[in-house]
Image: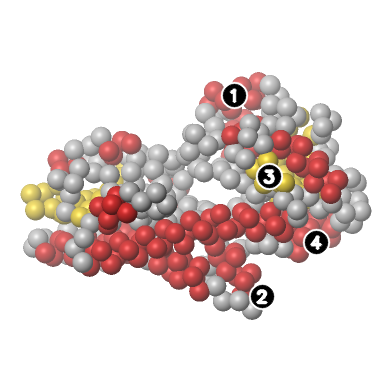
Amino acid sequence: MQDKKICVIGLGYVGLPLARLFSTKYCTVGFDKNKRRVDALMAGHDDTLELSDELLQDALNKGFRCTADIEDIRDCNIYIVAVPTPVDENNRPDLTPLVKASETVGTVISKDDIVIYESTVYPGMTEEDCIPVVEKVSGLRYNVDFFAGYSPERINPGDKEHTVEKIKKVTSGSTPQVADIVDELYNSVLVNGTHRAPSIRVAEASKIIENTQRDVNIAFMNELAKIFNAMDIDTHDVIEAASSKWNFIKLTPGLVGGHCIGVDPYYLIQKAQVCGIFPRIMSSARRLNDGMGAYVANRTIHFMNKKGVMVKNSDILILGFTFKENCPDIRNTKVIDIYNTFKEYTDNVTVCDCHADACKVKEEYDVDIVKDIPDNRYDAIILAVAHAEFLKLDVRAFAKDNAVIYDVKGCLDRNIIDARL
């Protein structure tokens, strides 16, 4: 395997850590069409913060390279695709990134090369949608001139414990021999090894249900939160009590954003409908979870009304904008729904996030955010994201005397809040 030259296509949250890991044992080049991203990486900084500057610089010093020039990857023989799989405004799978990445592979792939997909897809997409693009562009025949594998990513953005080298990976190949090569390749760099699936379709299906299962489970907790809130029962107290049973699965309600749990189920929903099955549980879970941002805002407004706080033209502070704590990832954040709901009543909505990139937030959501809380007093404060910096704050110090404090994450002192999800 030491003669393998690897190219990882897509240098985001998934591709960059993977490329860096492979570079510890193989000649590896990272490819991304975003030249600004490539230039920043070659200068030694990853703005996703998945790789520290020290780790990235060490990899660069040892020969790892990133490029936006397709000619730089033409001599590779293993191509790993790690591009996003988003949905459109109607929540239908948008295959554009995968198709373009497959076209890139088709431009450079040679006889006997292998293309491995890591992007989350519905069962069958690799061989039904991606491989035909490679065949068309390259003029090569699948499983005759070139081969394929699928090893779904399991990166958890911001997680410094379950880093890529510690993740047990599912692997698969388009032939038994290729499955052996793919499995050996990943096993050579992973601490906890692999699980070899019997087919690419099984590997694809395994990945899609990982995130769909979490989506459904969280939707159940969110529905319970709505029920118990209506009964004036603290949901977190209920969960703590139920958790005393040995086989209770402890989850908490919350906002479901990001590029995985809040998106991937739509791929399986779409494929199921093509097969004549309407997935009611998954579809209901998606609708429920997608509505939680507006629910949080309306619950806060409810408590403002109860305390006699005028909602119109009120001063609102939202703490956090990223989709999860302690990371800069703003993809599919549901905090935007809290913001938009309040904007129907007041223009005085301040969003503070010390991790999010203000320029990216403005570009993608047209929202201005601040890094530090302005010296002001607010009528309502919503802790939307549990960044470590926020948990150290005296939140009440920023609140007016009769202000409402709503704790989405359930991690603030109960004596200072009015409600939590």
Q: Nearer the viewer's eye, disc 1 or disc 3?
A: 3
Name the N-terminal-most of marks 4 and 3: 4
User: Observer-nearest residue: 413 or 57?
Assistant: 413
Kindly identify which residue carries mark 4: 132
Q: Which of these two is toward me, 1 or 400? A: 1
User: Can you see residue 208?
Assistant: yes
Q: Report x, y in % for residue 236.
A: 28, 52
Question: Which residue: 87% across, 50% down?
Answer: 146
Disc sitting over residue 275 in the figure: 2
Q: Earlier in the sequence, mark 2 or mark 4?
A: 4
The Cα–Cα distance between marks 4 and 3, rounded to whole angstroms, is: 27 Å
Compared with 405, 89 (above or below) is below
**Residue 57's disc number:** 1
**What amino acid is labelled 4 in the image?**
Pro
Q: Label 1 neighbourhood size at 10 Å, few (<14), some (14-19), many (20+)?
A: some
Type of the residue with mark 1: Gln
Asked if the residue under mark 2 is in contact with the one under mark 3, i.e. CB atoms within 8 Å, the reply is no
Q: Which residue is mark 3?
A: 195
